[in-house]
Structure formats: structure tokens, C-alpha cells
């Protein structure tokens, strides 16, 4: 019998090795796309019991952000550290998108909700592999350096709050990626590392889509409940996101992704006033 989408999502979450996890993620995304295109062999969304935390490889060692050694971005070691940090973010992103599917598959949605997050998970899998390829081209690998612990915190905090999850993960964390990626692209341009620039360009373009899925489905839920999205968004970010929103913001890409300035500026002002 074919596995349901929620079961497939859980299989990915339970796979520890990064390359294996992303290979399974690509395989299941392709199965889902094929079933949606053909309609003859539909895959049910179903339900599952995803783990509280996804399986992860033994390396990298996970440290609190303040214990992760800082390296100068202008050096080869610094650039490897950046690639390593991005690979870690992408691996978390793979799990975050599959977890969203597995954990909230019981919530009734138009099927497009699942199409969007399967696509996002598939793209994150590509991003992870791109970053691993770049690390390996520079004589390193994912796992060679310590990485930030606590990246799963947002998922655990919003384990039973779908609107909170959408507010914090795609609309805050992934939107933050849009703010900082141009600076990273510049850094690798200065280092004349064309292949890394090309990889980051792919990531930058596709992340706009993930943020837009977040905004789209957050607004969908607000509309279905007849509630005003902006104050609810502010309340959820204040509740679940610790650390504050840091300007400068990429207003252009945020707008493209459907996040208006009055969603994030009031939260940034609060932080600067403290
Ligand atoms: Fe990504
Ligand atoms: Fe993403």
C-alpha cells in the first residue's frame, strides 16, 4: 500500500544522515508531484506521529550560539564557516517543512497547501546538497564544524499552534534569510567563488517562494476564521519569537513574498527601543 503524505514526511524526519534525508525528500516530493499530475494513483494526505525532534547525524556537534567560534568572513576559513552554517540552516529547513506537513496534516486545507510545502521541502533538500557540494569543493564537509543548537526551538514552541508556526518559521525566520543573503552573495563575489555565488543565487530566488507560502496560508487561516491578520501576527511573533526582528530589512523581496512593512517594522521598533 502506498504511504500517505504524512507518513512519508515522518520517514524523512526519522532519517539522520543529511544526504540520505534529502535523497528521500526528493524521492517523496517526486512521488507526490507525479500523483498530483496523473490523478490515477492519488496519495492520501493521511495522518502520522512525527517525532518531537528530527533524527540528525552524530556530527556536527551542536553548541549554544554563543559557544560557536566566530571566524573572520574575509578569510577562506570564514567562508567555509558561512557555508557550513547555511548547510545547517538548510538541513533544518528540510525538516521544518516536512514537520509542518506531518504535524498539521489533520487540519483541513485545499490540496495546494500540501503542494506548496512539499515543493519547499524539495527545494531545501537541493539547497542543503548545494551547500554540501560547495563545502566539499573547499576541502570541508557538513559536520566538520560545530553548529547552532536550538534551531528546532521554533518548531517545538509551535508544536500545537499552526498559525504560530507559519508566523515564526516562514514569515520571520525564512524572511530573515531574504535580508541577509545578498550580503553573503557579495562576500563570495569578492572571493571570486562563482560556483558558490550561483548556488546562493538559486537559494535566494527560491526562498522568496517559501516566505510567500507562509504569508499565503497564514492569511488563508485568518480569512477562514474572519480575524485581522496583522495584530494576530504581531501577537504570535511576540509570543514565540525570542530575540527580536533586526533591521535592515529587504523590503523589496519581503514585498514580493507578501509580507508588508507594517507586519515587521513595529516588531523591530520594539527591540530598538529597549
Ligand atoms: Fe533553503
Ligand atoms: Fe526556505
Image: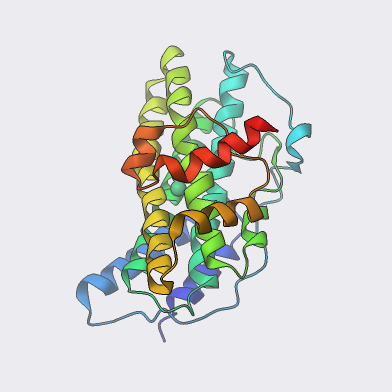
**Depth check: 268 or 51 in front?**
268
Identity of the residue drawn at 45% across and 51% down: 125
Q: Is residue 186 at all visible to an observer of this figure?
A: yes
Can you give x and y, in whole percent of width and height, for residue 129 in the image? 46, 43
Q: Is residue 168 above or below residue 199?
A: below
**Depth check: 145 or 229 in front?**
229
Task: Indicate the quadrant containing the C terminus: top left, top right, bottom left or bottom right.
Answer: top right
Please identify the quarter of the rendering in which residue 143 is found: top right
Q: Is residue 43 above or below residue 115?
A: below
**Depth check: 21 or 37 in front?**
37
Q: How many numbered dots are placed on residues in this image? A: 0
Q: How is the image coloured?
A: rainbow
Identity of the residue drawn at 61% across and 20% down: 78
Q: Residue furthest bottom?
A: 1
**Depth check: 248 or 95 in front?**
248
Identity of the residue drawn at 43% across and 73% down: 225
Can you give x and y, in whole percent of width and height, for residue 109 in the image? 38, 75
Identity of the residue drawn at 61% across and 27% down: 81
**224 sits left or right of 70 in the view:** left
Can you give x and y, in whole percent of width and height, for residue 203 in the image? 40, 39
**35 sits left or right of 72 in the view:** left
Q: Is residue 54 at all visible to an observer of this figure?
A: no
Task: Indicate the quadrant containing the N terminus: top left, top right, bottom left or bottom right.
Answer: bottom left
Can you give x and y, in whole percent of width and height, for residue 252 in the image? 34, 33
Q: Is residue 140 above or below residue 259?
A: above
Amino acid at each position: 500500500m502506498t504511504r500517505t503524505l504524512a507518513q512519508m514526511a515522518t520517514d524523512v524526519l526519522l532519517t539522520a544522515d543529511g544526504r540520505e534525508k534529502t535523497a528521500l525528500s526528493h524521492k517523496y516530493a517526486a512521488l507526490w508531484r507525479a500523483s498530483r499530475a496523473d490523478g490515477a494513483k492519488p496519495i492520501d494526505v493521511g495522518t502520522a506521529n512525527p517525532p518531537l525532534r528530527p533524527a540528525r547525524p552524530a556530527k556536527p556537534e551542536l553548541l549554544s550560539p554563543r559557544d560557536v567560534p566566530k571566524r573572520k568572513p574575509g578569510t577562506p576559513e570564514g567562508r567555509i564557516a558561512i557555508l557550513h552554517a547555511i548547510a545547517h540552516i538548510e538541513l533544518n529547513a528540510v525538516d521544518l517543512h516536512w514537520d509542518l506537513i506531518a504535524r498539521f496534516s489533520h487540519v483541513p486545507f485545499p490540496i495546494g497547501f500540501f503542494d506548496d510545502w512539499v515543493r519547499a521541502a524539495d527545494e531545501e533538500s537541493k539547497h542543503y546538497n548545494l551547500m554540501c557540494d560547495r563545502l566539499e569543493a573547499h576541502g570541508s564537509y557538513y559536520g566538520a564544524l560545530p553548529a547552532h543548537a536550538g534551531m528546532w526551538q521554533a518548531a517545538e514552541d509551535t508544536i500545537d499552534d499552526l498559525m504560530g508556526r507559519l508566523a515564526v518559521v516562514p514569515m520571520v525566520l525564512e524572511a530573515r534569510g531574504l535580508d541577509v543573503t545578498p550580503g553573503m552573495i557579495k562576500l563570495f563575489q569578492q572571493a571570486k567563488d562563482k560556483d558558490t555565488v550561483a548556488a546562493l543565487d538559486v537559494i535566494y530566488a527560491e526562498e522568496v517562494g517559501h516566505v510567500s507560502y507562509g504569508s499565503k496560508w497564514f492569511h488563508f487561516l485568518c480569512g477562514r476564521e474572519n480575524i485581522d491578520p496583522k495584530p494576530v501576527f504581531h501577537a504570535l511573533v511576540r509570543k514565540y519569537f525570542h530575540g527580536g526582528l533586526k533591521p535592515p530589512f529587504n523590503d523589496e523581496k519581503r514585498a514580493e513574498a507578501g509580507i508588508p512593512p507594517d507586519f515587521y517594522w513595529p516588531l523591530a521598533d520594539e527591540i530598538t527601543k529597549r
